[in-house]
Image (cartoon, rainbow, N blue to C red):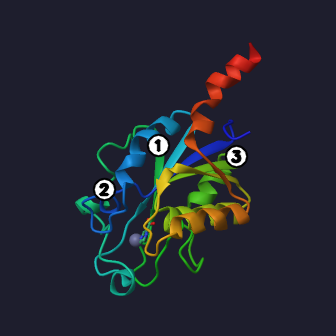
Amino acid sequence: MIVNNHSAFIIIDIQNDFCPGGSLAVKEGDRIVPVVNELQKRFALVVATKDWHPAGHSSFASLWPPHCVQETEGAEFVAGLDTSRVARVFLKGTDMDIDSYSGFFDNEHRRATGLGGYLKERGVTDVAIAGLATDYCVKYSALDAVMLGFKTTVVADACRGVEVREGDTARALEEMAAAGVRIIESRRLLDARASGSRQRA
Ligand code: VGL
Ligand code: ZN
């Protein structure tokens, strides 16, 4: 079962800088917002992450343009995202010298963000993940979730990829599936309640 009392929904980095007009814009990044808002209603527990870099973060020099700098407009959640049900926001990428694609740990697994412990303390066994970007932060969050023992689902159409190289999003989904992540479409979750009640009738 995907949605039960032991399930949590994790919203990854739906921030201005990852949406059209932002400094590290993901194509159609904003298009996932309505479906993410609908999906939230299916879960008793909703948490979110924010990419939250200090100015001059080490990742800006090498791979990425400056993005999601702490306390800037670019680091805020996009305006359309419903945050009223978000129980807690976990910040990632806060250490100057190391990046953190996963919402659970930095890229060398030196330090935890607290997300994994928070979920386990609340008896969460299953997680569903959506957000930005499929080929970076969603992927590494999902792989860490599996590693931590969560039954992990990624809602593919509620995510978009950066696609530094064309095909990265599709490859990321394959990689996640190979690691034991269930990849589904939002319809599976959004239709579940209605079809469930029909089946019981
Ligand atoms: C992300 C690149 C750099 C992401 C964050 O949220 O996927 N990607 N920082
Ligand atoms: Zn970042």
Q: Is residue 107 above or below residue 73?
A: below
Q: Quadrant of ligand 2?
A: bottom left
Quadrant showing the C terminus:
top right
- The type of residue carrying mark 1 is Val
Residue 125, percent from left and from top: 71, 49
The image quarter containing residue 180 is bottom right
Residue at horizontal 46 percent and vertical 75 percent from the top: 165
Left or right of 193: which side holds 103?
left
Residue at horizontal 69 percent and vertical 61 percent from the top: 177
Between 30 and 4, the one lying in front of the other is: 30
Left or right of 105: which side holds 85?
left
Between 115 and 23, the one lying in front of the other is: 23
Q: Which residue is mark 1?
A: 36
Q: Which residue is mark 3?
A: 123
- The type of residue carrying mark 3 is Gly
Residue 31, percent from left and from top: 38, 47
The CA span between labels 2 and 1 is 16 Å
Residue at horizontal 45 percent and vertical 69 percent from the top: 163
Q: Is residue 63 above or below residue 180?
A: below
The CA span between labels 2 and 3 is 29 Å
Which residue, as the protein is rendered here, is positioned at the far top?
201
For discs 2 and 1, the disc positioned in front in the rendered view: 1
The CA span between labels 1 and 3 is 23 Å
Mark 2 / mark 1, whichever is N-terminal: 1
Q: Which residue is mark 2?
A: 76
Left or right of 148: which side holds 15?
left
Badge 3 density bin: few <14, some 14–19, many ≥20, Cα 10 Å: few
Q: Is residue 104 visible?
A: no
